[in-house]
Image (spheres, rainbow, N blue to C red):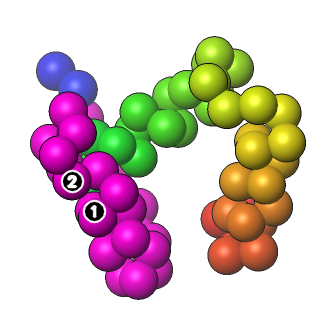
Amino acid sequence: MTTYTTVSIPVELAKKVKKLIKNTGFKSLSDYVTFVLREIVAGKSEFDRGEIEHVKKRLKSLGYL
């Protein structure tokens, strides 16, 4: 059985992500965030190095890293 934790993100960011994933295979914001984090942690991201660094800087500026 998989256990879960709660992670808080800014409401505006959540709204933007929900719009982004609309009509995709993702069922929820949590599913998408889990996917993105797994891709980054595994190092198998389809993002190029510059995009990954941009995401890391943004997450750091938001206080998540």
For residue 37, side relative to residue 46 (left or right): left
For residue 17, side relative to residue 56 (left or right): left
Camera sees residue 21: yes
CA–CA distance between discs 2 and 1? 6 Å
The amino acid type of the residue labelled 2 equals: Lys
Using a 10 Å C-alpha cutoff, classify the residue at mark 1 as few (fewer than 14 neighbours), some (14 to 19) or many (20 or more): some
Please state which of the two labelled residues, at mark 2 or mark 1, is closer to the viewer.
Answer: 2
Range of magenta residues: 3-28
Q: Nearer the viewer, residue 29 or 2?
A: 29
Tell me what residue is drawn at x 69 percent, y 20 percent: 43
Tell me what residue is drawn at x 68 percent, y 63 percent: 59
Q: Nearer the viewer, residue 40 or 19?
A: 19
Where residue 35 appears, x then y in whole percent? Answer: 41, 33
Q: Quadrant of the C terminus?
A: bottom right
In this rendering, the answer to whether 17 lies above or below 9 is: above
Q: What secondary structure is marked by label 2?
A: loop
Where residue 29 appears, x then y in whole percent? Answer: 27, 54
In this rendering, the answer to whether 48 lies above or below 12 is: above
Q: Nearer the viewer, residue 15 or 4?
A: 15
Q: What secondary structure is marked by label 1?
A: helix
- The answer to whether mark 2 and mark 1 are in CB contact below 8 A is yes
Tell me what residue is drawn at x 67 percent, y 32 percent: 47
The amino acid type of the residue labelled 1 equals: Lys
Q: Which mark is residue 18?
A: 1
Q: How many marks?
A: 2
Camera sees residue 6: no
For residue 48, side relative to residue 31 (left or right): right
Q: Which mark is residue 22?
A: 2
Q: Quadrant of the N terminus?
A: top left
Using a 10 Å C-alpha cutoff, classify the residue at mark 2 as few (fewer than 14 neighbours), some (14 to 19) or many (20 or more): few
Q: Is residue 23 magenta?
A: yes
Quadrant in the picture for residue 34: top left
